[in-house]
Image (tube, helix red, strand yellow):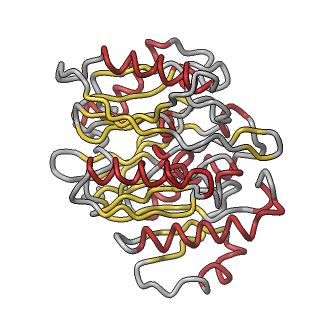
Amino acid sequence: MKPAEQNYSMPPEWAPHERTFISWPVQESMVYPEDYEAVCGGYLELIRAIAEFEPVSVVVNPSDVSRVRALFTEDNIEILPVEHSDAWLRDNGPTFLVNEQGERAGVNWIFNAWGGKYEPWDLDDHVAPQLLSRFGIKQFDAPLVMEGGSFHVDGEGTLITTEECLLNDNRNPEMTREQIEAALKDYLNVQKIIWLKRGLSGDETDGHVDNVACFAQPGKVLMQVCDDPTDENYEITRENLNILNTAVDAKGRPLEVIPIQQPPMASHNDSRLTLSYLNFYFVNGGIILPVFGGAAEAADRLAAQVLQETFPDRRIRTVNGMAVIREGGNVHCTTQQMPAGNAV
């Protein structure tokens, strides 16, 4: 039986967490291996920031365990020896589910390194089952390629994603849009899927939605916008904004859209960096927000202000968003929440 048939569903990210999972970087798989120490410094800052709010389990290659463990003195940071090649646990880790009794389960998606972009990915495809087994959590094996950063849910039956990613031929070319929708409904127990068109310019994940838009609560969506008509993101975000402004959720509610202005464009080696404030991460009682500094300082302050107004009961904890972005992702991409509940 599939998760929906057993009344399991994916809770929203803001629901209480038991812990956060995050993977430690692997130099051999980095786009810019010469930045390894700087990237590790960014992960160190991020892990400690999350640990201010909740326990953190750090997935580390066995050969790195002693070195990484020595970096942390916090009691609520644990090291898990698990072989992996890349450090984006949002995308290759399990997606956690909970049923009405508070029993947890996890979806093990097929992972193919964002459409076969980075070889090898066999170790990364086996991380999710190892984590579920380690914590005694029931496992559902989903028969499709999927990454956790490619969808968001509101906890009340609605999922948001992009056509650019989920309908890309490098993921599930043998499946139609309707078949992909059916699988998401079966494995995440959602009833309505809102399809945005494209992700942000320069995003090598083929348009992950976690850089574009996310639910703030049922019926309310945060979206990063661009007001510069000369920027490619202007057309992209306007098109997506039009979709959200005319969409209704699984309960039939129109959506309230809260815009967040994008930071100024930045590049590295002639490639655009996918800077996004929407790549923040909910923690218990707070939000971990990547900020970019320099020319982005005003936009950083505005983003933090919008989030504080939207979530007055949460502490906005900022971290250096430039530390890992050259590798292709940011705070949300590196993390995966385990909701509070019971193992089965």
**Count of labels in the image:** 0
Instruction: Report the front residue among 336 and 189.
Output: 336
Compared with 270, 326 (above or below) is below
Residue located 17% across and 23% down the image? 251
Instruction: Report the front residue among 43 and 106.
Output: 43
Q: Quadrant of the N terminus?
A: top left
Residue located 29% across and 31% down the image? 189
Instruction: Report the front residue among 244 and 89.
Output: 244
**Which quadrant of the structure image shows residue 114?**
top right
Compared with 212, 263 (above or below) is below
Instruction: Report the front residue among 129 and 194.
Output: 194
- Measured as percent of width and height from the top left, residue 179 is found at 45, 15
Compared with 141, 59 (above or below) is below
**Which quadrant of the structure image shows residue 174?**
top right
Q: Quadrant of the C terminus?
A: bottom left
- Measured as percent of width and height from the top left, residue 127 is found at 57, 54
Instruction: Describe residue 46's horizontal placement relative to residue 155 as left or right.
Output: right
- Measured as percent of width and height from the top left, residue 184 is found at 40, 27
Residue located 48% across and 46% down the image? 277
Compared with 322, 209 (above or below) is above
- Measured as percent of width and height from the top left, residue 224 is found at 46, 35
